[in-house]
Amino acid sequence: MEQICVAAEETERMSGTTPPTRDDQSLVASIAAGDREALAELYARYQQSLYSYLLQLTPDHGLAEEMLQDTLVAAWKSARSFEGRSTVLTWLIGIARRQAHNTLRQHKLPLADEAELACVASSEPEPEAFALNNLARDELVAAFRQLPALHREVLTLALVQELSYEETATILGVPIGTVKSRLSNAKRMVRALLMTKEEAES
């Protein structure tokens, strides 16, 4: 797999601003047929998105890199099972999430506790009711880092990766309503953290 990573870096350098010649599903089909160059191209296309996502599950950059490589290997092995029911990015993030949880268990590191989700009750009808985009970036990042892992994850999937409710629900293995509730709770927690900061500074 190390050779594929090197090939991915070369593919990324050579691609420049030229649009990719193969769409995601064509790449996965080629990977299923044993095309390592297709895997390298897919890796170059999504390594940053996957790495950013994995860093929300662990603050350890080295461990996130390990998880990323495990995701690459798993994608290579499972490409034939991809049925096109979701986008390729959703498929890859799902693989990354499983690899991350396996790795964290092996290292005996704590996983996010589902009980964390109950710490803030949500009454907002739609998560869009709170617009995070208008906040100062530094303040938002600081508040984001204080969130429990599950809330960071849903914000990353929905706002950073810009996945739909359906795609996020598929990755997390929960109903769409649960995704909306988690996202609303996460935004509410960010707002509460920012308000607390403002009060402390006033």
Image: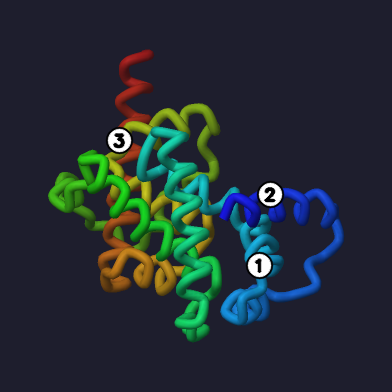
Specify few, some or many for label 2: CA neighbours under 10 Å numbering under 14, 14-19, or 20 or more. Answer: few
Determine which quarter of the picture holds residue 55. top left
- Give the distance between the C-alpha atoms of the residues marked 2 and 3, in whole angstroms: 44 Å
**Where does the image place residue 83, in percent across and percent down from the top left?**
48, 85
- Give the distance between the C-alpha atoms of the residues marked 1 and 3, in whole angstroms: 47 Å
Residue at left 51%, top 36%?
Answer: 135
Kindly report which numbered mark, 1 or 3, lies closer to the viewer in this rendering: 1
Circle number at residue 6: 2
Is 12 or 198 nearer to us in this picture? 12
**Where does the image place residue 123, in percent across and percent down from the top left?**
23, 57
Circle number at residue 36: 1
Residue at left 34%, top 60%?
Answer: 98
Q: Amino acid at mark 2?
A: Val
Is 196 or 181 nearer to us in this picture? 181
Give the residue number, with chain letter if any, for mark 3.
192
Residue at left 82%, top 65%?
Answer: 19
Q: Amino acid at mark 1?
A: Arg
- Give the distance between the C-alpha atoms of the residues marked 2 and 1, in whole angstroms: 11 Å
Location of residue 165 with respect to 140 vertically, above or below: below
Helix, strand, or loop for circle 2? helix
Taking 104 as reference, is 133 left or right? right
Specify few, some or many for label 3: CA neighbours under 10 Å numbering under 14, 14-19, or 20 or more. Answer: few
**Where does the image place residue 126, in percent across and percent down from the top left?**
36, 62
